Image: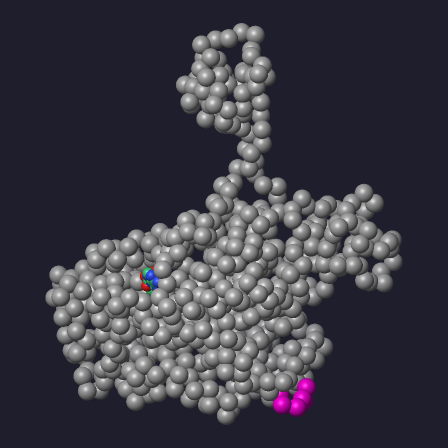
Amino acid sequence: MSSSLFPSPRRVAVLVPLALPEPYDYEVPEDMEVEPGSYVIVPLGAQLLVGVVWGEGASGLEAKRLKPIAEVLDVTPMPEGLRQFIDWMAAYTFNARGSVLRLAMRAPGALEPARVRLVYRLTDTRPARMTPARERVVEAVSDGFARSIREIADEAGVSDGVVRGLVEAGTLKAHEMSAEAEFPQIDFEAHGKPLSGEQAAAAQVLCERVKAEGFAALLLDGVTGSGKTEVYFEAVAQALRQGRQALILLPEIALTSQFLERFEARFGVRPAEWHSELSTRERARVWRGVSEGRARVVVGARSALFLPFAELGLIVVDEEHEAAFKQDEGVNYHARDMAVVRASLGAFPIVLSSATPSLETVVNVEQGRYERVALTERHGVAEMPVITAIDMREAPPERGMWLSPVLVREVAAAYVAGEQSMLFLNRRGYAPLTLCRTCGHRIECPQCSAWMVEHRFRRELVCHHCGYTSAIPKVCPSCHAENSLVACGPGVERIAEEVTERFPEARVAVLSSDNLRGPQSHEDAFRAVEAREVDIIIGTQIVAKGHHFPWLTVVGVVDADLGLENGDLRAAERTFQLLQQVAGRAGRAERPGRVYLQTYMPEHSVMRALIAGDRDAFLAREAQARERVKLPPYGRLAGVVVSSEDAGLAQKWARELARAAPNAEDVAVLGPAPAPLALLRGRTRIRFLVKAGRNVNIQAYMQAWLEPLKVPGRVRVSVDIDPYSFL
Ligand code: ADP
Ligand code: ZN
């Protein structure tokens, strides 16, 4: 392709990664060649920015007023599939196209020429004057391999100067070599585990869809431990066999070394990774590798969806029900839903994998849009764990304690038998609330409407919303009473305190994001558990996912009711999913698992479904309830948050918005109301919720509503299509 694709005068539309809805036109200078997708440097105001050629120039702007493109970068142009996807996603999520483009350009350095290093090889020329040191150099490089000056000097045992002398003399010749590690060749024909009959049948369906090279959405629905990973690895192998690339999306916390090792066990090498812990240099390497087709499989967190795959032929979304796939800041999007769109635009299959699929996905299966492939049995001899509720009204913990005697007995039994147990509580820190016994004052974050959480190990109070920290006060900040502040409620640290008191001999590990910073400490902690160096694990949701601990037999959920408190539309569904995942950690090998739910509501439908193991009945009831009130997936929602550091201004604009909301059939605008998090990082927040029928074009409604409003810069109006958070 050349610039002749564009009619003269040569002008093209260039999209820049800023919050701008449309590309701008630029002139292509005489001697420059660009094509759709080319990365170019263009002037915008006083700046020079990297943008992407989006298509033909369109504006009626006079040719002489167009600014010329400054430079074309020497990188593979952005594939058409990705550009289409960015356009589609921007329109759907109600974001500026430039903002979505920015997600696809988050690899600083990737657009610069790849770093090269100079290496040297022996030529036929010999220096006029030979010395023993020079002899040694010639000897060292006579095997024909290229090496850096440093390496040659080391091997020959000479100074750098001697080597440089030989370069000058023409005895060694410089070559450029990529300084980046290459992506190792994936061996997709080897190492496959022999699959069970059920697994093989599932893998075959997946592979057939991959072979067909058309869009298909599949739900791989299998109980925890049934081998879903092994099965979708076969689909990945099939995509590779067909010369396509594959992407496996995981919630960030499931992207563990355990997972990468399983990949390696199947494919012989580690995949390319993409997540927030990557160094800038590694990001650039992966981005380029994907774009040039050298990286064939990427395992990544949600933002991997925006990598410039040219030959993508399969996406797998593991743990598809996970709320972590929803991004709630900046550009709001649901990576699972957007992955389905990317597959559909690119005409290739997508596999959604889960033991507890989301209601959205289950309804898509029922309505025939997705195909369900089921795995009903755990692999090998492992049985599903037995789940029991502990009614906390009947078997309450002792005063100041949090574990029921029933649970304590089970943990003790496991400990005596040399097995591991795990206590799950999805709450970091020591106590979620600090209260003054004298005046009733609760310590809140000064910038957020949220309680400060005590972290006793760190000896401070922390806001979990904005990260603000303060020392634990000695006197009440309000009434100045001494020794009057008490910690209310438990976090994992407090449970650890109780466990240590009850089982002083036991080896206890607290696994939460506060104790595990970075992948290495994760790895160390999980390895210690696998190696049976830990007897009792106390963990937040970090332990709920994907880990395989063969010696873990007892799981205790400290507060099974916790997730039900916030009452949003998915509270029951999410609690069910989370507890089912946690329960799935128990009894994954020879020894059967037992799970105990501490609850004050054993009659709640979530507890009953968990105990009976009747997921489908639970989902059916949830579906009915949502259908009755036309909530997703039977209706559409959009959240709108008006926020400002100036509370008065936020209120004024919330009223403006309320006045401006157009009337439309089957659309209701609820609000304005103070958001549950009415103050966040010093900004006052006011919420609207738009509720519409399934057939309403909610984006068009939002456009008609919000576009005419000229909101000042100090007020932010953020729109969240298909919201998951209502805070
Ligand atoms: P899921 O993802 O469904 O929870 P996994 O894929 O993690 O299940 O499998 C659970 C465990 O069983 C893993 O340790 C896995 O290696 C093992 N496993 C599953 N299928 C097989 C198989 N066909 N042969 C050997 N091991 C298997
Ligand atoms: Zn805060």
Q: Is residue 579 above or below residue 691?
A: above
Residue 49 position, x and y percent, is 68, 51
Residue 33, magenta (yes or no): no
Where on the picture, by quarter, is residue 596? bottom left
Residue in the image at 36% along x and 58% along y = 193
Q: What secondary structure do most residues of the magenta stretch adopt?
A: loop
Where on the picture, by quarter, is residue 51? bottom right
Q: Is residue 716 visible?
A: no
Residue 642 position, x and y percent, is 58, 76
342 lies left or right of 162: right
* Residue closest to the far bottom: 628
Residue 663, magenta (yes or no): yes
Residue 250 position, x and y percent, is 45, 63
Instruction: Give the magenta part as a residue range.
Output: 662-667
Q: Is residue 606 visible?
A: yes
Residue 255 or 207: which is nearer the viewer?
A: 207
501 lies left or right of 257: left
Residue 692 position, x and y percent, is 60, 86
393 lies left or right of 308: left
Q: Is residue 387 above or below residue 381?
A: below
Residue 630 or 246: which is nearer the viewer?
A: 246
Query: How is colour applied across the structure in the image?
Result: one colour
Residue 451 or 521: which is nearer the viewer?
A: 521
Q: Is residue 275 above or below residue 717?
A: above
Residue in the image at 63% along x and 60% along y = 82
